[in-house]
Amino acid sequence: MCISPNSDDVEQRPQATDPVCGMSVTVETAKHSCQHEADTYYFCNPGCLEKFEENPIRYLDPESYEEEPADLTALYICPMDPEVEQIGPGTCPICGMALEPAMPNHNQGPNPELVDFTRRFWVGACFTIPLFVMEMGQHFFGLTFGLSSLARAVAQLGLAAPVVLWAGFPFFVRGWQSLKSGNMNMFTLIAIGTGVAFAYSTVALLFPDLFPMTFRSASGDVPLYFEASAVIIELVLMGQLLELRAREATGQAVRSLMDLSPPTALRVDAVGEEVEVSLGEVLVGDILRVRPGEKVPVDGVITQGRSSIDEAMITGEPFPVEKSQDDKVVGGTLNGAGSFLMSASHVGSQTLLSRIVSQVANAQRSRAPIQSSVDKVANIFVPVVLLSALIAFVTWSLIGPAPAMSNGLMAVISVLIIACPCALGLATPMSIMVATGRAAQVGILVRDAETFERLAHVTTLAVDKTGTLTQG
């Protein structure tokens, strides 16, 4: 039973505080508890219990606990351009996206880029919505909100500045990096388009006398486009969030495979004492105890005892397999009612489960043959868009309606943003990531992305085991 600390029952029955979430738990009715260093801790739900068991110190002594920093020696790769890899985190010089660990971490927390972009999106929305209402309300309904023209312009600058300069800051960084490296991408166009709109509007507000009549409307004012730059930043942030969430879900599919192996193992020493150790401490040749209902920690051979083991995750067999002395067992499979001792034969990255996880991760990063064609188009697409934007500006400035120069500037921004090749470079690799992750969740392992293209030409599917597709 989980109740609020302010409940009237708190003083009537013994209470304990859940060390994870801080809720008060009635001791006598608590369904979840844990012993740690001779003390008993109670939890309001199994999720809190699981978090506590993974890292008790984090919740018992939070002041001394330090989060593990990113592994600066690990290999990081770009999810969109898998040929880009480096030691330690960073950004991709081709597409500008944040690099990800080549192999997902078993205890990996939320994607920091997803957390950051989510915060930027919602904070930006708080400024963009009133900015949009203020500008569009004036255009369509004549709403002035009791403000003069100058006051509205200043207010729009104040609302747009946090969105463009803070919420959209990562886009400008990536756009600048793309220009320096010569690998122009979607962020190049976004940075130029929104940057030009915001800079032009700011200068027009602060120094209107600099602009000739070709920039002015019939009323003599220089049009401002603060709302355009802010709305574009918010829309691009939304697109990035959707993409990051898809990548997060795909990474979760790989981590769910890693979760099949238990975090600890029961090692038997030379005198027969059983000691619980982390899976990373298990060495080849160690004798391990596997109790009823537990998962087999690593690959090995049974040395004593017998049991039935559910190997459905590996073989697809719907029924447990009887195992006895000298039989091989696979890490991650589920032990039945028996108890046995086993000798570890493969540990760490050498276990069958680890190799499967590695294969799925490699498949997600592999490139389909069609991606090469897409890349060739994308490489020339950005320069073509920039040239098209320049042509649009010149055309509108020469033969467009008044104010010709302002309309020409809006034509530039429109071409840069609308022609942004977001889907061109992301659609194929993203579909591969999602497809391989989803396939792994249902037990289908794909060697590489080329498999999907070859599968399109398959006319007959042969299954070599009765019941594999219909049972289990």
Image: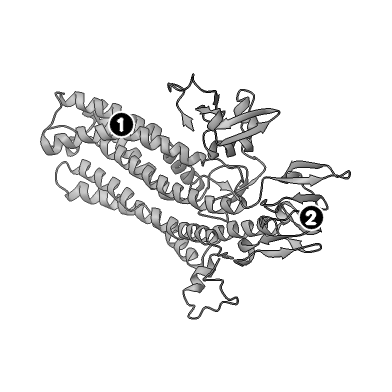
Q: Residue furthest right?
A: 271
Q: Amino acid at mark 1?
A: Phe
Colour scheme in use: one colour
Please tell me whether residue 281 is drawn above or below residue 347 in the rendered image.
above
Q: Earlier in the sequence, mark 1 or mark 2?
A: 1
Q: Nearer the viewer, mark 1 or mark 2?
A: 2
User: Quick check: 147 left or right of 103?
Assistant: left
Q: For residue 207, say whether it is visible.
A: no
Q: Relative to 39, is 435 on the left or the right?
A: left
Residue 165 falls in image quadrant: top left
Query: How many other residues sit within 10 Å of disc 1, few (<14), some (14-19) or many (≥20)?
Result: many
Instruction: Please state the horizontal and vertical placement of residue 427, each as a whole percent of the image.
Output: 42, 58
Q: Which residue is mark 1?
A: 127
The residue singled out by tag 2 in the image is 342
Residue displayed at 76% across by 63% down: 328
The residue nearer to you, when weighing 2 against 78, is: 2
Q: Could you classify mark 2 by the number of other residues whose Cα lies within 10 Å: few (under 14), some (14-19), or many (20 or more)?
A: many
338 w.r.t. 106: above or below: below
What's the amino acid at mark 2?
Met
Residue shown at 26% from the left, 51% from the top: 392
x, y percentage for residue 357? Answer: 62, 56
Residue 251: x and y in percent read: 53, 51
Residue 155 in sight here: yes
Task: Give the percent coordinates (x, y) of residue 103.
Answer: 62, 50
Is residue 16 found left or right of 123 in the rendered image? right
